[in-house]
Image (cartoon, rainbow, N blue to C red):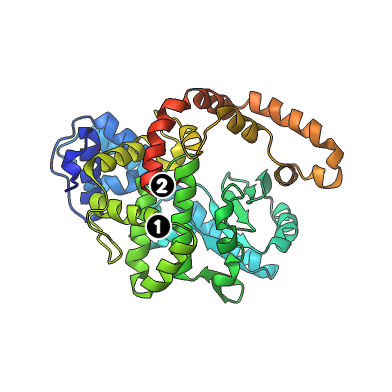
Amino acid sequence: MVSIEKIDNKLDIEFIECLKCALHKNTYNKPFLDEKKLFYNAINQGLPAIMVNGINKDLVSKQLYEVFQKHTFSFIHKDLRQQNLIEQLITIFNDINIRFVFLKGTILKPLYDETFMRGMGDIDVLVDRDKLDLIEKTFKKRGFKIYAKSPQHDVYETKDGLLVEVHPTLYSDAHDAYSNFFSNAIDYATFDNNYGRLEPNYELVYLIYHLAKHFRTSGIGLRSLLDISVYINHFEKVIHQKILDSYLEKTNLTTFFNTIMFLNYQYFGYRHYLYEDDFMDQDLFNQITEHLMSSGIHGKGTDFNFMAPRVAIEEKPNRIKIFFRLLFPKFYQMKSMYPVLKKWPILLPFMYIYRIIKKIFSKRSRKATKELIVAKQAANTMAGMFDKIGLR
């Protein structure tokens, strides 16, 4: 029988137990083995504003409790700014008569006890593809700057540094298996004037797909798992088992979904009617836990090789091919990133050179290259795990 107490890393055990206490409005009444590591894990997992509620301040140092409070206040401050921006976006889209659907964090934040408890990197919104040019023109008038472009989304930055991702599609071209299911996603939304919400069964499968995508290409942390339980807790009465099962089958995500359900029960004590008993053994559970704890949100954990999943997911991994695929995207991808190519495709070789030079001076790109070189050993371990949880 799988048990949290049988996890190899004792620091991971106490972190998960404290988090579970916080989620159920209880206090973790034990001293921590390593306060510094506890705080690092909370930041790495994006959970300081929740974790603080489970800490007994009489059993920890004043410094630890104050730093948790400080980061909680920073979550509150950013949340207020983002909520204000969300209201601005609603007004903007209504003014130009464009239908829109908020995604991911914007939908999940209100489902938590307080919106600030769930951190959010950017605001994601789905629109019709033929409205992207109008949105770009309108955003520029409002002082938004283009931050990045890709086939999946246009990213804008506000004057005060907040990011908005405008998506014409829900799927990444790196995962063609999902293109049919998510290609007409906006048709699964119901609208109040221009403001749309995805149908819950469909939206839940999209959230699962999004986790699978990041699991494959970088990593996810405990907060990403928690999002699924929070969502199901809120929408359980309107989630229909047969509809959900058919969607999961169409996207080949059934095994991964069951994995998420199993982990949510083991970590957080949230047992849904969708949960399966004895889904995995202790060894696999320990391996996944170590992966999640080291990965953190989107594979940004300090000690995590974020290139290893990209190697592991390949049936016949070739690091050189992966490197060149990252460095030299396909032409249609380059056109999205560098719009000048739409008018002047002959400039493609020069834009590749520009991209290479830019990557050379990018700290993250240099790190990615280094991680890719040493990724083989970590990837070999991950590959077996990916097979067992339905990701390969």
x then y, percent, for residue 303: 39, 28
Relative placement, left or right, of 305 versus 274 is right
Relative placement, left or right, of 262 versus 375 is left
x then y, percent, for residue 272: 28, 64
Amino acid residing under circle 1: Thr
Determine which of the numbered discs, if any, sits on residue 75 in the image.
2
x then y, percent, for residue 266: 23, 51
Quarter holding residue 181 = bottom right
Quarter holding residue 89 = bottom right
Residue 240 in sight here: no
Determine which of the numbered discs, if any, sits on residue 370 in the image.
none
The residue closer to the viewer here, 304 or 88, is: 304
Q: Residues within 10 Å of mark 1 (few under 14, many from 20)?
A: some
Relative placement, left or right, of 320 versus 113 is right
Q: Which residue is pictured at 72% across the width and 58% down the height?
A: 138
In the displayed structure, would residue 324 be above or below residue 242?
Answer: above
User: Helix, strand, or loop for circle 1?
Assistant: helix
- Distance from disc 1 to disc 2, alpha carbons, whole Å, reads 9 Å
Mark nearer the N terminus (1 vs 2) = 2
Quarter holding residue 350 = top right
Q: Residues within 10 Å of mark 2 (few under 14, many from 20)?
A: many
Determine which of the numbered discs, if any, sits on residue 115 in the image.
1
x then y, percent, for residue 257: 38, 56
Amino acid residing under circle 2: Phe
The quarter of the picture where the C terminus appears is: top left
